[in-house]
Image: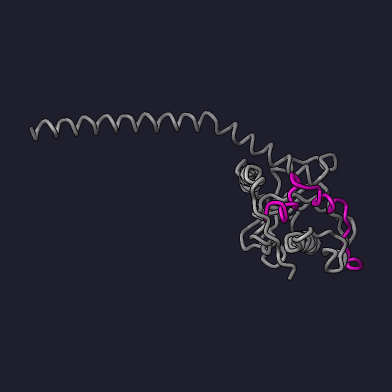
Amino acid sequence: MTKSIQQTMAKNGLILAIFAIITTGLIALTYFGTKDQIALQQQQKLLSILNAVIDESSYDNTIQLDCALVTSVKLLGSDEPQHVYRATKKGLAIAAAIETTAPDGYSGKIQLVVGITSSKTGAATVTGVRVLEHKETPGLGDKIDLRISNWVLDFDNQIYNAEIVQNWAVKKDGGQFDQFTGATITPRAVVKAVKLSVEYYLANQTAIFNAANACATDNAANTITEKAVAEDVLAEGVAAKSATAKKVSESDE
């Protein structure tokens, strides 16, 4: 009787082992059969985001494969390396798309990409801003997301220089950018992050374009596209709950 049980267990174990091997093999085949397609989709997603903040007609390089990795807790809001994608035309610096973090959002960090160009020392123009990832309150702070409102488009073609630096704040703080009804913290955090990104660019423009290319492989697309895809999933979840979501007003402190 014991021998029969042992034989049955051995047989079942063998069947499970064979099943595991076959399953692993199928997964591996699927991965290797689709990894090129996934990489291509990541590159296309990345390029669409970059072209949303930098006019694609303004440069002639492969921008999604041309970047520097930089770190600045003070100006870019994170101690993790962030990408700066470089737009050039005939080898000349045109603009940059800087990944940055607003660490002081109402519900946590807000991940952004900021397009910036500069043709004069000490002055720059923001060519576009997009929110990549956030956890702000549905119906209030989430208006920073272009899928919810057009607020983020107010940054388009905004000029920054020392003479008008006071304009780079929400209206409640004496600046030019609208805050949201019942939600000042979120737009304040985004405006500050964009302003600091411009200051980083102005202070490091030469170094950015002289730095070694950190995006020469397809892996370069992963960070920014993962953030954007995560935000797509988040938006779907928020949309499903928005009808019953409880609106909690943010403090105006």
Q: Is residue 38 above or below residue 75?
A: above
Identify which residue, 43 or 164, lies in the foreground.
Answer: 164
Q: Is residue 53 above or below residue 106?
A: above
| Residue 105 in which image quadrant | bottom right
Identify which residue, 237 or 54, lies in the foreground.
Answer: 237
Find out whether residue 145 is within the magenta segment. yes
Residue 36: x %, y % from top left:
58, 32
Q: Which residue is pictured at 64% across the width and 48% down the height?
A: 244
Outermost residue toward the left? Answer: 1
Residue 216 visible, this angle: no
Residue 172: x %, y % from top left:
83, 67
Quarter of the rendering occupied by the C terminus: bottom right
Q: How is the image coloured?
A: one colour
Magenta stretch: give its range: 137-164
| Residue 210 in which image quadrant | bottom right
Residue 72: x %, y % from top left:
68, 64
Q: Which residue is pictured at 66% across the width and 66% down the height?
A: 73
Residue 174: x %, y % from top left:
87, 68
Identify which residue, 57 or 146, lies in the foreground.
Answer: 146
